[in-house]
Amino acid sequence: MLALEHPGDPQRYRLRLQEHVDEADAIRGLLSAATACLAMPPRRPPRDIVIDPSDPGSVQALAARWLPELDCRWEKGLPRLSACAFRVMLVCLRHQDGLRWALVTGEEWLTGRQERPRALLLLDALLATPWGTGYNCRLELLPGSGLTLGARANPLKLPLAYRGIDGLALAVDVEGTLCLERRPTPPA
């Protein structure tokens, strides 16, 4: 589970991974970390609201109810990325054992004649704590990256590779992204 610490300075928040309880608690931690990315005061979603981690609509409903000041929008498939604008989002990945959620903390881009995204840098609350970075796994976006994992690791022939900094390698497909953006403030 992700927790936000602010030792001494209330303006600086540091992410710390704790032993997770379950996938629903991991999603609550990711939403809490997303508030830090949006420079909002840290807070945890209430535990009394039941969510189903295998249902993106349930996760979107929790985010919309708990964060009314944000526009919580579900986008099917790969996220729309821009080299000049970063959006805070949770990505929902399908792998052979079900769904997995992670917070996008960065992007890698290929440069040259055709600038295009290469990978998403992710924070996964179910993986080991990152050390010296803001991510603990990568989602490789190049077509066929999942096929490089081999037939044993990818029996469903899923198209993308998801690699943790601890050695985890999963073949995945992107179900969609939950984009979290501040609502425009009305003019005074």
Image: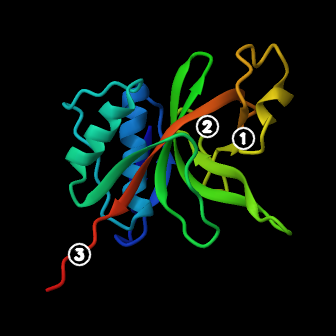
Percent x, y of residue 128? 61, 37
Residue at 37% x, 61% y: name it.
Answer: 181
Q: Name the spot of residue 98 as percent of width and height, x first.
A: 53, 19
Spatial CA distance of label 1 from label 2 is 8 Å
Residue that mark 2 sits on: 128
For residue 36, side relative to residue 69 (left or right): right
Indicate the quadrant where residue 162 lies.
Answer: top right
Residue for point 74% across, 59% down = 116
Along the viewing direction, whichever of 14 and 188 lies nearer the viewer: 188
Residue drawn at 70 percent across, 16 percent down: 156
Quote the CA–CA distance across marks 3 and 2.
38 Å
User: For the residues carrying marks 3 and 2, which lies nearer the camera in this image?
Assistant: 3
- Tell me the quadrant of the picture where the N terminus can be found: top left
Give amino acid for label 1: Ile
Q: What element carries label 3?
A: loop
Disc 3 or disc 1, which is closer to the eye? 3
Q: Quadrant of residue 188?
A: bottom left
Which of the two discs, 3 and 1, labels the residue nearer the N terminus? 1
The answer to which of marks 1 and 2 sits earlier in the sequence is 2
Q: Is residue 171 above or below residue 39?
A: above
Which element is circle 1 on?
Answer: loop
Give the labeled residue for mark 3. 185
Look at the numbered discs 1 and 2 and tell me whether their residues touch, using CB distance below 8 Å. yes
Figure coloring: rainbow
- Circle nearer the N terminus (3, 2): 2
Residue at the disc numbered 1: 165
Distance between the alpha carbons at the discs numbered 3 and 1: 39 Å
Residue 96 higher or lower than 112, as above or below: above
Q: Looking at the image, which is closer to me, 137 or 53?
A: 53
Name the residue furthest left. Answer: 188
Judge the density around disc 2: few (<14), some (14-19), many (≥20) Cα neighbours within 10 Å.
some
